[in-house]
Image (cartoon, coloured by chain):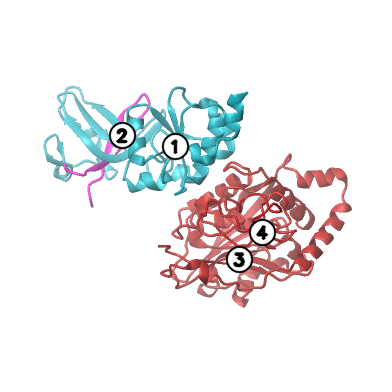
Amino acid sequence: MHRRLILVSLGVLLTVGSVMAQEREVGKGLQDRPDRESLRMCGTREVTEEEALSLEAHTEMLLSQRSVEDRFRIQSSATTVTVNVYFHVVTSSTGAGAVSDQMIADQIRVLNDSYSGLTGGANTRFRFALAATDRTANSTWFNASAGSNAEKAMKTALRRGGAGDLNFYTTNGGGLLGWATFPSSYASNPSYDGVVCLFSSLPGGSAVPYNEGDTGTHEVGHWLGLYHTFQGGCSKNGDFVSDTPAERSEAYGCPAGRNTCAGNKYPGNDPIENFMDYTDDFCMYKFTAGQATRAGSLSGTYRGL
Amino acid sequence: MIFFLLLSILTKADVPRVTAEELRAMLERGEAVAVDVRGSVPYELGHLPGAFWMPLGVLNQRAGELPEGKTIVAYCTCKAEETSLEAALVLLKLGQPKVAVLHGGYPAWLAAEFPVSSTRGERRIPAAVSCSGELKSIEGEVSEYRRGQDSTVLRVGTETVTLAHAGSEDPSRFFLIHGSPLAANDWNRIEAKKGQALPGMKAVAWICSGGQTFVDWLPAR
């Protein structure tokens, strides 16, 4: 039986430059329910095809203003860019959620393994280095939910660096595994930028089967500009990455051979092994080359990376 | 040509699976080597003793380091061998003749309570253990324990270690208990009688290449 229920939501509020957030959710208090799929909730609305297309057009317009060399630089993995990571450990007033320095170092290594292709996927241009760690005991912030005033207060107080600096918060998750902001939202709301992860999802944590650090990899994927692999379902554009097979809905566990968009139009099984799906941590191990390019484009355009 | 055509149509269903028990026996007979295809953090936290670490992303480049003539058994954390099957296909296509995967992956090995190694300081190196060479640790049940005139032989997990103590029957200077030096009144916590370990006793063998081996006994606290 699954010890934790993972409920996933894609939360996007998008016009170009507005806030976008995506979340993997943990259903609090639902740990003993066996049918976690049926308990899926969506706390915020999904991005519509029109909204996504609008962002694509805007990004393409901005990219077209760059030189060929510059576009190549941000879209290829030929040259890497190291992202500074500011780690903010938020605990309850009694110390719950106090992840160790080792777990933080491990999370950084998991990011580097994932984004360099070591675990089996495409090499991206992103590498990560811990810039600083701070620790704050504040029960209100520790229990903050996505989009709450407490979350905004926490980020306003703790956030450091600029558009290209990753602020990584660990909290009690507010009922979620994590959530993130997209690159395009930075300009309109810089203090809100960053990723939030359930503290026990860090490598070696207790959030089995989501305790190998891939929640961090997943949320940082959003922070770099990636959608879920099931974004858009079986529609033509899907997640706006051509080499991720279409997927009608999120996958849980590790359902080998799952194929929710069948037929000649949709070659390949569902990308359950992709970091941007919702499968168990042990199941996900790759980004595709298309995702590497997209992350480069979006982050290069909106984060200056 | 036909060979390459056959390779191109290999599927995951063609890859044999071995159980944890079968793999342990194969390793003990020297018939197999284990290959850990996971990322650096899970590998460091715990892996099969003696396993090669070759994550899926570097397998193509590093497969040449694997010994010839042995069955290569890939494993991952995955319960249905998802990643290890990907690795097995890579190895088969590179020409490895005997490739298999560990059924149930690393969790199955843990469930069988077989020994694991860690390259991580999760288990702190006891202060008494000094080593100028490569230090490895093996943790497991003590299945063999012979105290001789000049040496003591133990089998910890899958590893047999010999402690030389010429001129003395007493190996205690190479023994620790939960990381601390063994005291005289600690013997009854590890031995039923002289030279007979208590049933189910576990220990960590700290093996220094070209140096001294120490055994850290782990009786129930």
The secondary structure type at the circle numbered 1 is loop
Image location (x, y in percent) of residue A60: 84, 56
Q: Which residue is mark 3?
A: A23
**Position of B158 relative to A14 (above/below):** above
Q: Amino acid at mark 4?
A: His
Pick whichever, A130 or A64, lies toward us.
A64
Q: Which residue is mark 1?
A: B16
**Position of B201 relative to B2 (above/below):** below
Chain of the residue that carries numbered disc 2 in the rendered image: B
From this viewpoint, is residue B55 visible?
no
Asked if the residue under mark 2 is in contact with the one under mark 4, i.e. CB atoms within 8 Å, the reply is no
The secondary structure type at the circle numbered 3 is strand
Asked if the residue under mark 2 is in contact with the one under mark 3, i.e. CB atoms within 8 Å, the reply is no
Q: Residue at x 55, y 70 (%)?
A: A40
Magenta stretch?
B198-221
Q: Are marks 3 and 2 on the same chain?
A: no
Q: Amino acid at mark 3?
A: Glu
Q: How many marks?
A: 4
Tell me what hue chain B is rendered in. cyan
Q: From mark 4 to mark 3, how far is it between C-alphas?
A: 9 Å
Task: Kindly identify which numbered label has been placed on residue B115.
Answer: none
Q: Amino acid at mark 2?
A: Thr
Give the image quarter of residue A58. Answer: bottom right
Q: Amino acid at mark 1?
A: Pro
The secondary structure type at the circle numbered 4 is helix
Tell me what hue chain A is rendered in. red
Q: Which residue is mark 2?
A: B158
